[in-house]
Image (cartoon, grey):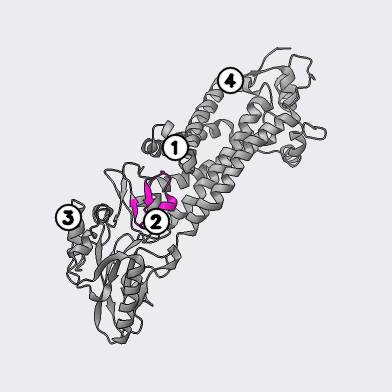
Amino acid sequence: MHTVAKLVDTSTCIGCKACEVACQEWNDQDFTIGAFDGTYQTLPDLEHNFWNLIKFNEFSREDGHMTWNMAKYQCMHCVDPGCLKSCPAPGAIFQQKDGIVDFNHDLCIGCGYCITGCPFDVPRLNPNSKKVYKCSLCSDRTAVGLEPACIKACPTNCLTFGTREDLIQIANARSAELREDGFAGAGVYNPQGVGGTHVLYVLKDATDPESYGLPKDPKIPWAVSLWQGPVKWLGSLVLVGGVLGAFFHYLRYGPKPTHDKAGGDA
Amino acid sequence: MPKQIHRFSFSERAIHWLAALSFLYAALSGLGLWSHHLYWIAVVLGGGVTTRWGHPWGGIIFSVILGAMFLTWARQMRLSADDRTWLRNARKYAVHDEKGLPEAGRFNGGQKMLFWGQGVLTFLLLASGVILWFPEWMPRTLRLAAILIHPIAAVGSIGMIILHIYMGTAGVPGSFRAMIRGWVTPAWAASHHPKWYRETFKN
C-alpha cells in the first residue's frame, strides 16, 4: 500500500499563515491569544489547541542580509514514531497503514510519555482534559479522499499532499532546481534516524536544518529505546524468574526448618 | 517459659500492612502501565485514566508510610559485622545449611538488606515518579532519566518484595503469624533469631 505524506517546500512559503487558520478552523480549535514577543510568528510554540505553526526563523546570510527560514512546524508523522513507542495505553496512539500517526483521545490516559518520546517535541498536554493533542494530518479528511486542511488553504502550492513515493521524487526534483538556481545546499529533509517521516521538507540549505528549527539528526531518545527494549524484557524476566525461583526453591529445599532448641512448640 | 514471644507491636504491624497495601496498589497499577500485555490490570483497577491518576498517589502514600517505617526500624536495621558475614554466606542460608552462619538478632542480614534496599529504591521511585507525574513542568533531560530509572527501580523493588512475600509466608513458617498476630513460639525465635531470643529472655 502507498503511504501518504505532506511536502513542505520552504522556498515558496510566504508566511501568510493560511495553513494555520485552516488547521484551527477544520479542527474546531479554540484559540488562546498569547503575548506579543516582537516577531511575526503567531505563537512562540505549538499548543495543545494549536497544531500547526509557521516558524519565522530569522537567519543572517553570509552577505549580511536577513532572511526568514520559514518552516511549518507540526507533527512529522515519523515512520518509527517515538510517541507510539512510549505510549502505555494500547490504541491511544496508532499508526495507520497509510503512515499517519494519530491519537485516540478516548483511550489516552494523559501520562505524557509521548511528549518525552517525541524527538521533535510536538505533542502537547491539555491541562483541562488531561489528554495529549497534535496534528492528525487531517486523518478525518484524508480518510474520505480530501487533502489536509493546511494544504487545501496554501496559496503558493508550497504544500503538497500525495503518496510518499511521489512526494520524495517531487522533493528531489525541486531540490535539484534550487541547486541550479544557486542554492548549493538545497535538499530534502526526511530524517532517517526515525525511519524517515511522512512530512517532508525541501530546504534551501539542507546542510543546516537547525536554521529552520528542525533537529539535525532526530532519533527516538536512547533512554526510551532502552526502556521499551532491554529493560522491559529483562525486567519481565526478573519478575517472572523471581516468582518461579521462589516456587522451585520451595520444591527443592522446602520451608526453613524450626529446630526445637528451646524445647517449646514449633 | 512463655508459649508466646511478643515479636511485633501493634504499631509495627499496622505500619507494615499499610506499607504492604499501598505497595501492592502502586506495584499493580505500575505493572498495568509497564506493558500492553498487562494493561488489563489497569482496566481492573478502574481504567487507564484512573490508574494514571491513582498510581502516583499510591506511590506517595507508600513513601510516607515507608518514612514511618524508617522512624520505627532504622536503628535496629544497622548492619553489624555478624550481619555482613551472614550476607556473604546468604547462599548457605538459602539451602538451610546454617553451620557457620552467624546468629541473627531481631532481624537477620537479609531482612536488613530488604529494608535498606527498599529505602534506596523507593527514594529513586519517588524522585523519578514526581518527574513523570508532571511532564509539562519538567526539563526533557530529567524526564528521559526518569523514564529509565523508574521502571528499573520498580523491577528491583517488586523483585525484592516477591522474595520477601515468599520468605514471609511459605518460606519460613511462623513468620506470617508473627506479622499478623504479633507473636512467635520460643522455638521459632531460638531457631531463626537466636541472638534476639537470648536478649529477650535475659531481660
Q: Mark 1–mark 3 contact, CB under 8 Å?
A: no
| Image spot of residue B166 (x, y percent) | 64, 30
Measured as percent of width and height from the top left, residue A8 is found at: 28, 69
Name the amino acid, label 4: Ile
Q: Secondary structure at mark 2?
A: loop
Q: Say which chain tag 3 marks.
A: A
Q: Which element type, helix, strand or loop, lies under badge 4?
A: helix
Q: Residue at x 38, y 50 (%)?
A: A94
For marks 2 and 1, the one nearer the N-term is 1
Residues at badges 3 and 4 in contact (C-beta under 8 Å)?
A: no
User: Disc 1 marks which amino acid?
Assistant: Ile
Dot placed on the residue nearer the N-terminal end, 4 or 1: 1
State the residue position of label 1. B60
Q: Does the magenta segment cover residue B37?
A: no
Q: Is residue B199 left or right of residue B52?
A: right
Q: Residues within 10 Å of mark 4 (few under 14, many from 20)?
A: some
Instruction: Judge whether A69 appears above or below A251 on screen.
Output: below
Local packing at callout 1 (Cα closer than 10 Å; few below 14, some 14-19, many 20+) is some
Marker disc for residue B139: 2
Q: According to the image, label 3 marks what residue?
A: A25
- Screen quadrant of the N terminus of chain A: bottom left
| Position of residue A39 in the picture relative to residue B190 (left or right) | left
Q: Residue at x 79, y 15 (%)?
A: A263
Residue B180, label in figure: 4
For mark 1, name the chain.
B
Residue ID at (80%, 20%)? A261
Amino acid at dot 3:
Glu
